[in-house]
Amino acid sequence: MKSGLSRRVLKWWDEHRRVLPWRAAAGKTQDPYVVWLSEILLQQTTVQTVMPYFEKFLRTWPRVEDLAQASLDEVMSAFAGLGYYSRARNLHECAREIARRNGAFPRTESELRHLPGIGAYTAAAIAAIAFGQPATPIDGNIARIVARLIALDAPIAISRGKISKAAAALTPADRPGDYAQALMDLGSMICTPRNPACPVCPLRQDCAAAKNGDPTAYPPRAPRKQKPVRHGAVFFARRSDDAILVRRRPAKGLLASTIELPGTNWTTKFDAREKEAAPFEASWRLLPGAVEQPFTHFVLKLRAYAAWEMIPELAVADCFWLKREEIAQAAFSGVMRKALAHAVSQTRLIDADA
């Protein structure tokens, strides 16, 4: 089955491949820097979301050495809005490591996995796509395809070993990078989670799920757990020159190194004393409404307080003032950009009604 299956997949892809800004033209060698950059940006994110980010990154830093010379603040700012900000730190650190190697990426999965931010999937993708190694990257699309091929009767989350073994057995020695990208496209265009286009799928004769009559039943979904809610508050202070008070999150952990409004810790229960965490004494006023942001393992609800007077130039521990012209390019996370917009809009509404 292996050789026939891969031939059909590659034939389909040669005719229907998606044109993406990080893909080399047919028959051309892929630039490992471009492959690596795109794969990092695509983690936990959609293709449509990533496209403008990728194009901006490549315009700004066309070579890995250019990215290595950038400051972490510049990289974090360019990454703002994509989430999972540890990727930005690892991206910068990895670029610096590759620059120390004279711009040369390792060619094998095992060597690639020693680089910052490169796990099993990314290492396999780079090895296969950039270097033609017979590696088997398994993203969500590929996992779903393999699960249907073998009519997997357990959720993907608890069957990764079985999926990996089956996928590796199907990976061809010839054109492994094209084959991997073909499966990615097949999962996006044909073997979709709902309403798969089985009649035009090059794998239909090999697919046990299709033969069983209901491919969407595979793989079975794990029971969805309700996410717990965490609560917090932020404090919006504006200086007379329209600079706002901010701070930087720790270098490790959720939203690492991003810019945020000063605020409370995030707790599992609402803290009635949250106002006491204000960064300095002022006439703090609770603003109407709240900001809500889902994360992987919880939902965050943030309330906002505003200082109801223009603040003079003062020093605040662990914080700094961000000038008005710097706000748009600052490395705020998505949730903090949302909290800032909420605070600005609510203060304007209240001022207008006053």
Image: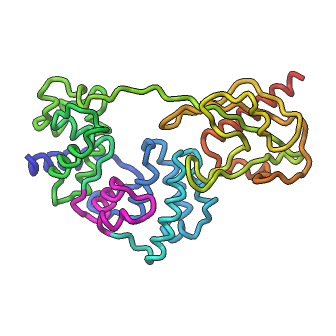
- Residue 345, given in percent of the width and then of the height, sits at 75, 31
- Residue 192, given in percent of the width and then of the height, sits at 29, 33
Describe residue 345's horizontal placement relative to residue 36 as left or right: right
Quarter placement of the C terminus: top right
Residue 302, magenta (yes or no): no
Provide the residue span drawn in magenta.
107-135
| Depicted 131 relative to depicted 168: above or below | below
- Residue 195, given in percent of the width and then of the height, sits at 28, 26
Residue visible at 14% across and 35% down in the picture = 207
Residue visible at 19% across and 49% down in the picture = 165
Q: Please state which of residues 18 and 117 is positioned toward the viewer in this rendering.
A: 117
Question: Residue 352: which quarter of the image?
Answer: top right
Q: Please state which of residues 115 and 267 is positioned toward the viewer in this rendering.
A: 267
Question: Residue 101: which quarter of the image?
Answer: bottom left
Residue visible at 77% across and 52% down in the picture = 319
Residue visible at 55% across and 31% down in the picture = 299
- Residue 243, given in percent of the width and then of the height, sits at 82, 48
Regarding residue 77, the answer to whether it shows in the image is no
Describe residue 57's horizontal placement relative to residue 222 as left or right: right
Point out the residue furthest to the top here: 353
Q: Please state which of residues 18 and 257 is positioned toward the viewer in this rendering.
A: 257
| Depicted 71 relative to depicted 350: above or below | below
Describe residue 92's horizontal placement relative to residue 184 as left or right: right
